[in-house]
Amino acid sequence: MVYIFSIFGLLMGFGVGLGVINVILRNATKDQIENDKSLIWKYGSLVWLFALGGGWLGYWVYNHNFL
């Protein structure tokens, strides 16, 4: 059951991270987003940090509310 909470948290965190970079990059042009390779590491890692945080949050919720 802990895996379900963690995977759900990971997916939700990934979605939140994508939403955050969508807001951050809304003024950037399509060409800038496609061609600037520094954006991959900067904003890609931000998305994964949100995803890992969501996975940890799902784990924490399970341990504190269901055990």
Image: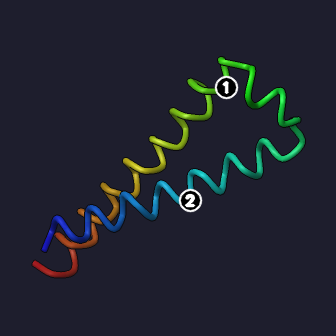
- Residue found farthest to the left: 67
> Which residue is at 53% across, 43% downward?
47
- Helix, strand or loop at disc 2? helix
Q: Nearer the viewer, residue 40 or 46?
A: 40
User: How many numbered marks does the figure carry?
Assistant: 2
* Three-letter amino acid code at the position of disc 2: Val
Circle 2 crowding by C-alpha within 10 Å: few under 14, some 14–19, many from 20: some
- Residue 56's quadrant in the figure? bottom left
Q: Mark number for residue 16?
A: 2
Q: Nearer the viewer, residue 58 or 28?
A: 28
Position of residue 50 measured from the top left corner of the image (x, y, whole percent): 48, 49
> Which residue is at 40% across, 58% downward?
54
Q: Mark number for residue 22?
A: none
- Describe residue 4's horizontal placement relative to residue 1 as left or right: right
- Describe residue 14's horizontal placement relative to residue 64 as left or right: right
Q: CA distance from mark 1 to mark 2?
A: 18 Å
Locate the N terminus by quadrant.
bottom left
- Residue 35's quadrant in the figure? top right
Check if mark 1's residue and mark 2's residue have beta carbons within 8 Å: no
Position of residue 17 measured from the top left corner of the image (x, y, whole percent): 56, 51
Q: Which residue is denoted by mark 1 in the rendering?
A: 39
Instruction: Say above or below: 61 vs 34.
Output: below
Circle 1 crowding by C-alpha within 10 Å: few under 14, some 14–19, many from 20: some
Locate the C terminus by quadrant.
bottom left
- Helix, strand or loop at disc 1? helix
- Residue 6's quadrant in the figure? bottom left
Number of the front mark, 1 or 2: 1
- Mark 1 or mark 2: whose residue is earlier in sequence: 2
Instruction: Say above or below: 1 vs 20.
Output: below
Instruction: Say above or below: 58 vs 49.
Output: below
* Three-letter amino acid code at the position of disc 1: Leu
> Which residue is at 32% across, 56% downward?
55
